[in-house]
Image (cartoon, rainbow, N blue to C red):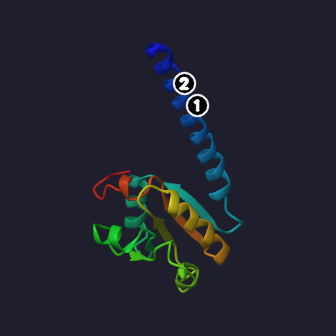
């Protein structure tokens, strides 16, 4: 009986994990497609570090809460919490013609922010896949 319960628990977990990865993949394919002349990329931590080194003009946007931001952030990051009711207005004040690198803690909130930035007309959006947790400032591409 215990073995059967354990087996069904593992099967259920595997199905849920598979469904999540399928959902996230389909969401990413839609989200990170870009209009002609625009860029929208999903970078890992090392690629994000290389991007920032190659593009120092990039606006770094941290969409976590102010408490999370206070515990550590990427160099030069501006904190605009996606939970702030005025997020869209504040993000719209950024320069839409300069690249923007957006991140949160794990990648969910920043994906929501990418959708908003696209709607606002940002032309070059870079996103850190898996968020701040994947950031490695000394990583090499």
Residue position marked by numbered label 1 in the rendering: 15
Q: In this rendering, does residue 74 appear at all?
A: no
Badge 1 marks a residue whose secondary structure is helix
Name which residue lies at 57% across and 36% down.
Answer: 16
The residue wearing badge 2 is 11
Is the residue 117 above or below the residue 2 in the image? Answer: below
Q: Position of residue 101 (x, y in %)?
A: 47, 68
Residue closer to the observer: 75 or 80: 80
Question: Where in the figure is residue 106, as x and y percent of width and height?
Answer: 44, 55
Residue count near mark 2 (Cα–Cα under 10 Å), binned few <14, some 14–19, many ≥20: few
The residues tagged by marks 1 and 2 sit, at their Cα atoms, a distance apart of: 6 Å
Task: Indicate the position of residue 42 as horizontal and vertical percent values.
Answer: 53, 56
User: Residues at badges 1 and 2 in contact (C-beta under 8 Å)?
Assistant: yes
**As drawn, 73 above or below 95:** above
Neighbor class of circle 1 (other Cα within 10 Å; few <14, some 14-19, many 20+) is few
Residue 80 seen in the current view: yes
């Amino acid at each position: 009986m215990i073995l059967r319960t354990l087996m069904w628990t593992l099967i259920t977990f595997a199905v849920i994990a598979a469904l999540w990865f399928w959902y996230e993949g389909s969401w990413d394919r839609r989200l990170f497609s870009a209009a002609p002349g625009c860029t929208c990329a999903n970078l890992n931590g090392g690629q994000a570090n290389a991007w920032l080194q190659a593009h120092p003009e990039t606006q770094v946007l941290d969409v976590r809460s102010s408490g999370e931001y206070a515990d550590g952030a990427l160099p030069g990051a501006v904190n605009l919490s996606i939970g702030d009711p005025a997020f869209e207005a504040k993000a719209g004040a950024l320069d839409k013609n300069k690249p923007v690198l957006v991140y949160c803690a794990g990648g969910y909130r920043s994906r929501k922010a990418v959708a908003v930035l696209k709607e606002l007309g940002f032309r070059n959006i870079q996103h850190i896949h898996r968020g701040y947790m994947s950031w490695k400032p000394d990583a090499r591409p």
